[in-house]
Image (spheres, helix red, strand yellow):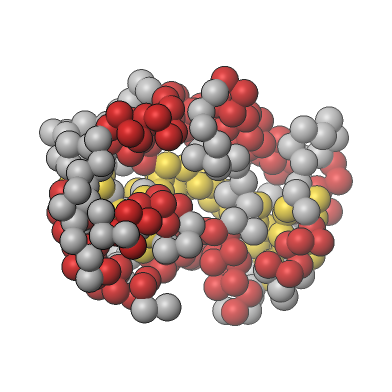
Amino acid sequence: MKKIVITGATGFIGKNISTELINRGDEVVVFSRSPERAKSIVPGAHAYVKWDYNSENNDGWIKYLEGADSVIHLAGESVMAKRWNEEHKKSVLDSRVLGTRSLVEAVSKLKYKPNSFISASAIGYYGTSETEIFNEKSDSGNDFLARVTRKWEEEVVVNKYFGVREVRVRIGIVLDKKEGALAKMITPYKFFVGGPIGSGKQWFSWIHIKDVVGIFLHVLDNTKVSGPVNAVSPAQINMNQFSKILGRVLHRPALFKVPSLVIKLIVGEAEYLVTEGAKVLPKVALESGYNFVYTDLGNALSNIFKK
Protein backbone atom coordinates (compact mmCIF):
# COMPACT_ATOMS: atom_id res chain seq x y z
CA MET A 1 0.00 0.00 0.00
CA LYS A 2 1.25 3.46 -0.94
CA LYS A 3 0.33 6.85 0.44
CA ILE A 4 -0.63 9.07 -2.50
CA VAL A 5 -1.50 12.77 -2.28
CA ILE A 6 -3.59 13.95 -5.24
CA THR A 7 -4.71 17.44 -6.20
CA GLY A 8 -7.51 18.05 -8.68
CA ALA A 9 -9.09 14.81 -7.53
CA THR A 10 -12.66 15.86 -8.28
CA GLY A 11 -12.03 16.61 -11.96
CA PHE A 12 -12.79 14.13 -14.73
CA ILE A 13 -9.29 12.64 -14.80
CA GLY A 14 -8.67 13.07 -11.08
CA LYS A 15 -11.74 11.18 -9.89
CA ASN A 16 -10.92 8.27 -12.19
CA ILE A 17 -7.32 8.05 -10.96
CA SER A 18 -8.33 8.50 -7.31
CA THR A 19 -10.98 5.79 -7.53
CA GLU A 20 -8.53 3.37 -9.10
CA LEU A 21 -5.93 4.04 -6.39
CA ILE A 22 -8.48 3.60 -3.59
CA ASN A 23 -9.80 0.40 -5.17
CA ARG A 24 -6.32 -1.12 -5.33
CA GLY A 25 -5.76 -0.37 -1.64
CA ASP A 26 -3.62 2.75 -1.62
CA GLU A 27 -4.00 5.41 1.07
CA VAL A 28 -5.23 8.45 -0.86
CA VAL A 29 -5.15 12.01 0.47
CA VAL A 30 -7.32 14.37 -1.58
CA PHE A 31 -6.47 18.07 -1.94
CA SER A 32 -9.55 19.96 -3.13
CA ARG A 33 -10.93 23.50 -3.22
CA SER A 34 -14.03 22.00 -1.60
CA PRO A 35 -13.12 19.09 0.71
CA GLU A 36 -16.79 18.46 1.62
CA ARG A 37 -17.78 18.16 -2.03
CA ALA A 38 -14.77 15.92 -2.66
CA LYS A 39 -16.04 13.44 -0.07
CA SER A 40 -19.08 12.70 -2.22
CA ILE A 41 -17.20 12.63 -5.54
CA VAL A 42 -14.23 10.56 -4.31
CA PRO A 43 -15.49 8.50 -1.34
CA GLY A 44 -13.09 6.33 0.59
CA ALA A 45 -10.04 8.59 0.70
CA HIS A 46 -7.94 8.73 3.87
CA ALA A 47 -8.23 12.52 4.22
CA TYR A 48 -9.66 15.57 2.46
CA VAL A 49 -7.58 18.76 2.58
CA LYS A 50 -8.32 22.33 1.50
CA TRP A 51 -6.48 23.29 -1.71
CA ASP A 52 -5.78 27.01 -1.98
CA TYR A 53 -2.65 27.96 -3.86
CA ASN A 54 -3.32 31.66 -3.18
CA SER A 55 -2.71 31.13 0.53
CA GLU A 56 0.46 32.79 1.77
CA ASN A 57 1.16 29.84 4.04
CA ASN A 58 1.29 26.29 2.66
CA ASP A 59 2.68 24.86 5.90
CA GLY A 60 -0.77 23.44 6.69
CA TRP A 61 -0.21 20.92 3.91
CA ILE A 62 2.99 19.59 5.47
CA LYS A 63 1.43 17.02 7.83
CA TYR A 64 -0.59 15.54 4.97
CA LEU A 65 2.35 15.45 2.57
CA GLU A 66 4.80 14.00 5.11
CA GLY A 67 5.34 10.30 4.49
CA ALA A 68 3.71 10.30 1.05
CA ASP A 69 5.18 7.92 -1.51
CA SER A 70 4.01 10.15 -4.34
CA VAL A 71 2.25 13.40 -5.16
CA ILE A 72 -0.03 13.42 -8.21
CA HIS A 73 -0.76 17.00 -9.22
CA LEU A 74 -3.77 17.56 -11.50
CA ALA A 75 -5.23 20.86 -10.26
CA GLY A 76 -5.68 23.69 -12.75
CA GLU A 77 -8.38 25.92 -14.24
CA SER A 78 -10.12 24.27 -17.22
CA VAL A 79 -8.74 25.76 -20.44
CA MET A 80 -12.09 25.60 -22.25
CA ALA A 81 -14.33 26.40 -19.27
CA LYS A 82 -14.99 29.91 -20.60
CA ARG A 83 -14.58 31.95 -23.75
CA TRP A 84 -11.00 33.21 -23.74
CA ASN A 85 -10.34 36.72 -22.49
CA GLU A 86 -7.39 38.18 -20.61
CA GLU A 87 -8.92 37.36 -17.22
CA HIS A 88 -9.54 33.71 -18.07
CA LYS A 89 -6.11 33.30 -19.68
CA LYS A 90 -4.50 34.70 -16.53
CA SER A 91 -6.49 32.24 -14.42
CA VAL A 92 -5.39 29.34 -16.64
CA LEU A 93 -1.75 30.38 -16.30
CA ASP A 94 -1.77 31.24 -12.58
CA SER A 95 -3.65 28.12 -11.48
CA ARG A 96 -0.97 25.98 -13.10
CA VAL A 97 2.22 27.93 -12.48
CA LEU A 98 1.47 29.38 -9.03
CA GLY A 99 -0.42 26.28 -7.90
CA THR A 100 2.47 24.00 -8.85
CA ARG A 101 5.02 26.38 -7.32
CA SER A 102 3.15 26.43 -4.00
CA LEU A 103 2.89 22.64 -3.88
CA VAL A 104 6.55 22.12 -4.80
CA GLU A 105 7.58 24.60 -2.10
CA ALA A 106 5.62 22.56 0.44
CA VAL A 107 7.32 19.36 -0.77
CA SER A 108 10.73 21.02 -0.42
CA LYS A 109 10.05 21.60 3.31
CA LEU A 110 9.35 17.94 4.05
CA LYS A 111 11.71 15.97 6.25
CA TYR A 112 10.91 12.83 4.27
CA LYS A 113 10.23 13.74 0.67
CA PRO A 114 8.07 11.64 -1.68
CA ASN A 115 9.67 9.29 -4.16
CA SER A 116 7.91 10.97 -7.05
CA PHE A 117 6.00 14.09 -8.08
CA ILE A 118 3.77 13.33 -11.06
CA SER A 119 2.09 16.29 -12.69
CA ALA A 120 -0.47 16.61 -15.41
CA SER A 121 0.62 18.58 -18.45
CA ALA A 122 -0.75 18.77 -21.98
CA ILE A 123 0.24 18.02 -25.57
CA GLY A 124 -0.45 21.71 -26.13
CA TYR A 125 3.23 21.97 -25.12
CA TYR A 126 4.17 21.19 -28.74
CA GLY A 127 1.98 23.76 -30.46
CA THR A 128 0.31 22.71 -33.72
CA SER A 129 1.44 21.32 -37.07
CA GLU A 130 -0.04 19.30 -39.94
CA THR A 131 3.33 17.87 -40.98
CA GLU A 132 5.59 17.50 -37.93
CA ILE A 133 5.49 14.41 -35.71
CA PHE A 134 6.09 15.12 -32.02
CA ASN A 135 7.54 12.96 -29.27
CA GLU A 136 8.83 13.75 -25.78
CA LYS A 137 12.12 15.14 -27.13
CA SER A 138 10.42 17.65 -29.44
CA ASP A 139 10.69 21.37 -28.74
CA SER A 140 7.89 23.47 -27.31
CA GLY A 141 5.60 25.56 -29.50
CA ASN A 142 5.02 29.32 -29.24
CA ASP A 143 1.25 29.80 -28.96
CA PHE A 144 -0.52 30.71 -25.71
CA LEU A 145 -1.16 27.15 -24.49
CA ALA A 146 2.39 26.08 -25.38
CA ARG A 147 3.78 28.95 -23.32
CA VAL A 148 1.50 28.12 -20.40
CA THR A 149 2.47 24.46 -20.49
CA ARG A 150 6.18 25.24 -20.73
CA LYS A 151 6.03 27.53 -17.67
CA TRP A 152 3.91 24.94 -15.84
CA GLU A 153 6.46 22.20 -16.48
CA GLU A 154 9.35 24.41 -15.41
CA GLU A 155 7.80 24.49 -11.92
CA VAL A 156 7.51 20.68 -11.85
CA VAL A 157 11.15 20.14 -12.86
CA VAL A 158 12.29 21.92 -9.68
CA ASN A 159 11.53 18.68 -7.79
CA LYS A 160 14.60 16.94 -9.15
CA TYR A 161 16.87 19.46 -7.44
CA PHE A 162 15.94 18.01 -4.07
CA GLY A 163 15.97 14.37 -5.13
CA VAL A 164 12.35 13.76 -6.12
CA ARG A 165 11.62 11.89 -9.35
CA GLU A 166 9.52 14.22 -11.50
CA VAL A 167 7.16 13.10 -14.27
CA ARG A 168 5.13 15.38 -16.55
CA VAL A 169 2.24 13.56 -18.23
CA ARG A 170 1.35 15.44 -21.40
CA ILE A 171 -2.28 14.52 -21.89
CA GLY A 172 -4.00 14.48 -25.28
CA ILE A 173 -7.71 14.81 -26.08
CA VAL A 174 -9.43 12.59 -23.52
CA LEU A 175 -12.56 10.94 -24.89
CA ASP A 176 -15.71 11.00 -22.79
CA LYS A 177 -19.35 11.50 -23.75
CA LYS A 178 -20.14 13.75 -20.78
CA GLU A 179 -17.02 15.90 -20.41
CA GLY A 180 -14.33 17.45 -22.58
CA ALA A 181 -14.03 17.97 -26.34
CA LEU A 182 -15.99 14.89 -27.44
CA ALA A 183 -19.01 15.84 -25.30
CA LYS A 184 -19.24 19.13 -27.22
CA MET A 185 -18.61 17.55 -30.61
CA ILE A 186 -21.41 14.98 -30.51
CA THR A 187 -24.26 17.51 -30.30
CA PRO A 188 -24.49 18.14 -34.09
CA TYR A 189 -24.49 14.39 -34.72
CA LYS A 190 -27.61 14.04 -32.57
CA PHE A 191 -29.39 16.30 -35.07
CA PHE A 192 -27.89 14.53 -38.12
CA VAL A 193 -25.66 17.49 -39.03
CA GLY A 194 -22.32 16.22 -37.70
CA GLY A 195 -19.04 16.33 -39.54
CA PRO A 196 -15.40 17.41 -39.39
CA ILE A 197 -14.37 20.72 -37.84
CA GLY A 198 -12.32 23.17 -39.88
CA SER A 199 -10.26 21.75 -42.75
CA GLY A 200 -10.50 18.20 -41.42
CA LYS A 201 -6.78 17.74 -42.07
CA GLN A 202 -5.69 18.65 -38.54
CA TRP A 203 -4.41 15.85 -36.32
CA PHE A 204 -6.62 14.60 -33.50
CA SER A 205 -4.38 13.12 -30.79
CA TRP A 206 -6.91 11.20 -28.71
CA ILE A 207 -6.78 8.85 -25.72
CA HIS A 208 -9.36 6.82 -23.81
CA ILE A 209 -9.78 7.71 -20.12
CA LYS A 210 -8.84 4.14 -19.15
CA ASP A 211 -5.43 4.64 -20.75
CA VAL A 212 -4.96 8.05 -19.10
CA VAL A 213 -5.46 6.35 -15.75
CA GLY A 214 -3.28 3.46 -16.88
CA ILE A 215 -0.38 5.72 -17.83
CA PHE A 216 -0.53 7.63 -14.51
CA LEU A 217 -0.42 4.34 -12.58
CA HIS A 218 2.32 3.06 -14.87
CA VAL A 219 4.61 6.04 -14.18
CA LEU A 220 3.70 5.91 -10.49
CA ASP A 221 4.82 2.29 -10.18
CA ASN A 222 7.68 2.33 -12.71
CA THR A 223 10.46 4.20 -10.93
CA LYS A 224 12.66 4.25 -14.05
CA VAL A 225 10.35 6.70 -15.82
CA SER A 226 11.01 10.41 -15.37
CA GLY A 227 10.54 13.62 -17.33
CA PRO A 228 7.86 14.10 -20.00
CA VAL A 229 5.49 11.26 -20.97
CA ASN A 230 2.92 11.68 -23.74
CA ALA A 231 -0.51 10.29 -22.87
CA VAL A 232 -2.02 9.76 -26.31
CA SER A 233 -3.01 6.69 -28.30
CA PRO A 234 -0.26 5.36 -30.57
CA ALA A 235 -2.83 5.23 -33.42
CA GLN A 236 -3.33 8.88 -34.35
CA ILE A 237 -5.74 10.11 -37.02
CA ASN A 238 -6.91 13.38 -38.53
CA MET A 239 -10.22 15.13 -38.00
CA ASN A 240 -11.78 13.79 -41.22
CA GLN A 241 -11.05 10.21 -40.16
CA PHE A 242 -12.23 10.87 -36.61
CA SER A 243 -15.54 12.29 -37.83
CA LYS A 244 -16.26 9.32 -40.07
CA ILE A 245 -15.58 6.83 -37.28
CA LEU A 246 -17.62 8.86 -34.78
CA GLY A 247 -20.53 9.00 -37.22
CA ARG A 248 -20.35 5.25 -37.76
CA VAL A 249 -20.38 4.52 -34.02
CA LEU A 250 -23.29 6.92 -33.45
CA HIS A 251 -25.14 5.67 -36.56
CA ARG A 252 -25.24 9.23 -37.87
CA PRO A 253 -23.91 10.89 -41.04
CA ALA A 254 -20.68 12.90 -40.87
CA LEU A 255 -21.17 15.01 -43.99
CA PHE A 256 -21.46 18.57 -42.70
CA LYS A 257 -18.21 20.46 -42.17
CA VAL A 258 -18.16 23.02 -39.37
CA PRO A 259 -16.29 26.13 -40.64
CA SER A 260 -13.48 27.56 -38.52
CA LEU A 261 -15.35 30.88 -38.40
CA VAL A 262 -18.25 29.26 -36.54
CA ILE A 263 -15.87 27.81 -33.94
CA LYS A 264 -14.20 31.21 -33.52
CA LEU A 265 -17.57 32.85 -32.88
CA ILE A 266 -18.24 30.30 -30.12
CA VAL A 267 -14.88 30.03 -28.34
CA GLY A 268 -12.98 33.09 -29.57
CA GLU A 269 -9.18 32.99 -29.58
CA ALA A 270 -9.19 29.36 -28.41
CA GLU A 271 -10.49 28.38 -31.87
CA TYR A 272 -7.05 27.15 -32.93
CA LEU A 273 -7.16 24.42 -30.26
CA VAL A 274 -10.00 22.84 -32.25
CA THR A 275 -9.18 23.73 -35.86
CA GLU A 276 -5.46 22.99 -35.63
CA GLY A 277 -3.78 19.94 -34.15
CA ALA A 278 -0.59 18.00 -33.66
CA LYS A 279 0.47 14.42 -34.33
CA VAL A 280 1.89 13.32 -30.98
CA LEU A 281 3.29 9.85 -30.28
CA PRO A 282 3.61 8.10 -26.86
CA LYS A 283 7.24 7.06 -27.32
CA VAL A 284 8.20 6.93 -23.61
CA ALA A 285 5.05 5.09 -22.53
CA LEU A 286 5.58 2.38 -25.15
CA GLU A 287 9.33 2.05 -24.59
CA SER A 288 8.83 1.75 -20.82
CA GLY A 289 6.37 -1.12 -21.26
CA TYR A 290 2.92 0.40 -21.06
CA ASN A 291 0.32 -1.66 -22.92
CA PHE A 292 -2.54 0.45 -24.25
CA VAL A 293 -6.08 -0.81 -23.67
CA TYR A 294 -7.46 1.13 -26.64
CA THR A 295 -5.48 1.72 -29.82
CA ASP A 296 -8.47 1.48 -32.17
CA LEU A 297 -10.68 4.58 -32.16
CA GLY A 298 -13.80 2.67 -33.16
CA ASN A 299 -13.43 0.31 -30.22
CA ALA A 300 -12.71 3.21 -27.85
CA LEU A 301 -15.80 5.15 -28.95
CA SER A 302 -17.98 2.02 -28.86
CA ASN A 303 -16.91 1.46 -25.26
CA ILE A 304 -17.69 5.07 -24.33
CA PHE A 305 -21.14 5.16 -25.89
CA LYS A 306 -22.31 1.78 -24.64
CA LYS A 307 -22.08 2.99 -21.01
Is residue 264 visible from the viewing direction of this image? yes
* Front residue (pair 85, 21): 85
User: Total number of numbered labels?
Assistant: 0
| Quarter of the rendering occupied by the N terminus | bottom right
Does 152 sit left or right of 305 as displayed? right
* Front residue (pair 7, 236): 236
Name the residue located 35 percent from the left edge and 58 percent from the top edge: 186
| Quarter of the rendering occupied by the C terminus | bottom left
* Front residue (pair 25, 13): 13
Does 121 sit left or right of 33 as displayed? left
- The quadrant where residue 98 appears: top right
Is residue 233 visible from the viewing direction of this image? no
Residue 268 is situated, as x and y percent measured from the top left of the image, at: 43, 27
* Front residue (pair 158, 103): 103
Work out whether 149 lies above or below 21: above
Residue 111 is situated, as x and y percent measured from the top left of the image, at: 77, 48
Name the residue located 57 percent from the left edge and 79 percent from the top edge: 24
Residue 54 is situated, as x and y percent measured from the top left of the image, at: 77, 33
Work out whether 147 lies above or below 47: above
Name the residue located 68 percent from the left edge and 50 percent from the top edge: 113
- The quadrant where residue 289 appears: bottom left
- The quadrant where residue 234 appears: bottom left
Does 76 sit left or right of 274 as displayed? right
Residue 299 is situated, as x and y percent measured from the top left of the image, at: 25, 73
Does 285 sit left or right of 36 as displayed? left
Name the residue located 53 percent from the left edge and 47 percent from the top edge: 119
